[in-house]
Image (cartoon, grey):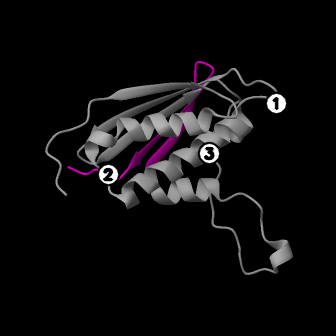
Amino acid sequence: MTRTTLLPVFSILVVSGQLAVRDALRQLLDGLKPLDLDVEEAGTVELVMAEALNNIVEHAYPEGDTSGPIRISCEHAKDGLHLTVVDAGRAMPDGRTPVGAAADLDVDFCDMPEGGFGWFLIKDLAKDVTYQRHDMENHLRMRLAVALS
């Protein structure tokens, strides 16, 4: 499907906590409805953003601190969706995103990793993933090659 009009830039603000990811994903997908994403495109957006947001909720904010803001900006361009996620939580270890390598699954079932797939999925499905710490905030930027014009 060729899209001739671009979606206006929009932003979402949620407060870190149990329901933050669900609320943010609902708002994001609602905001993207005018693009009429197909099931695969919507699934890609939802999966990548769920992983990024869950990382913020679980790791960026200290235990017990559920009051931290998470801002998401979405801009639709000819090359896809440009997403920026900003939080005021802890910085990424070593000031950069994890490598995001695929886990070795050729092991006994009891030795299978329980986690660590998030950054692999983000970096595999998103393009131009960048992270910066600026003014005591984390800025994660990425582009999803969906809703191409």
Residue 80 position within the rendered picture, expressed as x and y whole percent measured from the top left: 31, 47
Of the two numbered discs 2 and 3 in the rendering, the one whose residue sits closer to the viewer: 2
Q: Residue at x 21, y 38 (%)?
A: 6
- Between marks 2 and 1, how big is the CA–CA gap? 36 Å
**Quick check: 1 left or right of 104?**
left
Q: Amino acid at mark 1?
A: Glu
Separation of residues labelled 1 and 3 (CA atoms):
20 Å
Q: What's the residue at 70%, 34% (across, down)? A: 18
**Could you say which is closer to the camera, residue 26 or residue 121?**
26
Distance from the alpha carbon under mark 2 to that under mark 3 = 28 Å
Q: Circle 1 sits in a helix, a strand or a loop, which is it?
A: loop
Which residues are the magenta region? 126-149
| Residue nearer the viewer, 79 or 18 | 18
Count residues near mark 1 (Cα–Cα under 10 Å), then give few for <14, some for 14-19, many for 20+: few
Task: Identify the element where label 3 is drawn.
Answer: loop
Quarter of the figure that contains the N terminus? bottom left
- As drawn, the label of residue 37 is 2
The nearer-to-camera label among 1 and 3 is 1
Q: Residue furthest right?
A: 110
Provide the residue designation for mark 3. Answer: 97
Q: Amino acid at mark 2?
A: Leu
Q: Is residue 126 visible?
A: no
Residue 8 x, y percent position in the rendering: 26, 30
Asked where in the image residue 44 lies, by quadrant, the reply is bottom left
Identify the residue at horizontal 23%, vertical 45% (top origin).
78
Which amino acid type corresponds to the residue marked 3 in the rendered image? Thr
Q: Which residue is identified by label 1?
A: 63
Describe the element under mark 2 as helix, strand or loop: loop
Magenta region includes residue 87: no
